[in-house]
Structure formats: structure tokens, C-alpha cells
Image (cartoon, helix red, strand yellow):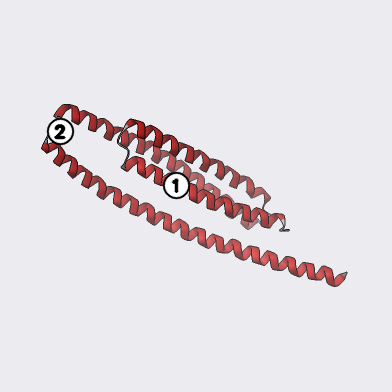
Amino acid sequence: MAPISDRGALEAHILHQEIVRLDTMAKQKIDYIMEKVRDEKALHEETREAKDLLASLGSKIDMLKAVTSRLSSRREQQNVRENAERHSKELAENQQQLRSATIHARRVINESARSSLLEGGSDEIERRKRQMDEKNLKEDAVKTTERLSDLLSKMGEQVAQSEQTMDSLVHSSSVLVQTHKEFESHA
């Protein structure tokens, strides 16, 4: 049976991974709203799903904060606190980006409706729309590349932290084995 500290560190590690997964899903949903949603019904549904993801993310961050008190090592506690704080900031950014994406999608929906009412679908409108779509695709590609780069760096940090946690667990395990042998030799 693992000591409480090791279980706490393992729980913190698992929660951290779940938070990164939910954060990635939320960012993808926000990007989808910004780039693809072009009608009110879809906007409402996608926004609701994004809010649900962000609520789950907030809950996991709170759970990570609660695990901090169960860690015996001050270094582990500090690392988990810093991660929780960083995740809280990311959550606030995601919430702001969701608001911006929703506003952008509504604006695009309204402009599309207005232009179709005013101009009635001429060839010039189609040409302008294609040009705007190309421009938007280029901008979206740049944004997506930046987000992927950010995600890659976060994943690198995650791997480094996982290695530190694994080293800590291996060290704790060897200390336990050594202590067990000492108890057996004294008995």
C-alpha cells in the first residue's frame, strides 16, 4: 500500500493530466465556434458545450487545489499550487476567449443575414465572400499554429513534470524498501 504522500502526488498528477486534456478540448471548442459556427442554433449549442467544458475544468482545478494539503513535501505542494494557479489563469483566458468567439460568430451571422437581405446573392457578393473566407482561413491557420505551439510547449512541461514525479515516486519507493529492510533486520 502506497504512503499518503505518494497517493496524493499520484492523484495530483492524474488531475493535472485531466486538466490539460479538458483545457485542450475547451480550446478546440472555442476555435470551432470562432471558425465554423454560422447559425444561431449551432452557436447556442456549441457555446453551451464549451461552458460545460469550462465548468468541468474549473471543478478539476479546485480538486487539484484541495490535493495540495495532502502532500507531505513542501516542494510538491509548491509545484501543485503553481500548476493550479497557472490553470486558473488559463481558465480565465478560456472564458474570455469564449466570449470573444461568441461575439465574433454572432457578428458574422448578423453580417451574413444583412448582406443576403440587402444584396440578394450577386456574383460580386460571392467573390467578396470567397476573398473574406480565404483571409479568415489564413488568419485561422496562424491562430491554430500558435495554439498548437503553445500546446506543444505545455505538453513538454507536462512530460518534464511527469518525469520529476516519477523520480520522486521511485525515490520514495526505494526509501520504503530500505526502511522495511531495516525493520526486518532489527526484528
Name the residue rendered at 21%, 47% in the picture. Answer: 134
- How many neighbours does mark 1 have within 10 angstroms: few (below 14), some (14-19), or many (20 or more)? some
Q: Which element carries disc 2, helix, strand or loop?
A: loop
Does residue 25 appear to the left or right of 108 in the view shown?
right
Query: Would you identify the image quadrant in which residue 63 lies?
Result: top right
- Give the numbered dot on residue 122: none
Residue 62: give x, y in percent of width and height: 58, 42
Query: Would you identify the image quadrant in which residue 36 lies?
Result: top left
Tell me the quarter of the image containing the N terminus: bottom right
Dot 2 amino acid type = Gly
Name the residue rendered at 75%, 70% in the picture. Answer: 178
> In 3D space, how far apart are the residues under numbered discs 2 and 1 (Cα atoms)?
36 Å
Q: Which is more foreground, mark 2 or mark 1? A: 2
Nearest the camera: 168 or 29? 29
Dot 1 amino acid type = Met
Q: How many marks?
A: 2
Does residue 42 appear to the left or right of 177 in the view shown?
left
Query: Would you identify the image quadrant in which residue 29 lies?
Result: top left
Kindly identify which residue carries mark 2. 121
Residue 107: give x, y in percent of width and height: 28, 33
Does residue 71 appear to the left or right of 31 in the view shown?
right
Residue 106: give x, y in percent of width and height: 31, 32
In this view, which residue lies farthest toward the right? 187
Question: First in sequence: mark 2 or mark 1?
Answer: 1
Does residue 20 appear to the left or right of 9 in the view shown?
left
- How many neighbours does mark 2 have within 10 angstroms: few (below 14), some (14-19), or many (20 or more)? few
Kindly identify which residue carries mark 1. 25
Residue 164: give x, y in percent of width and height: 58, 63
Name the residue rendered at 42%, 54% in the picture. Answer: 151
Tell me the quarter of the image containing the C terminus: bottom right
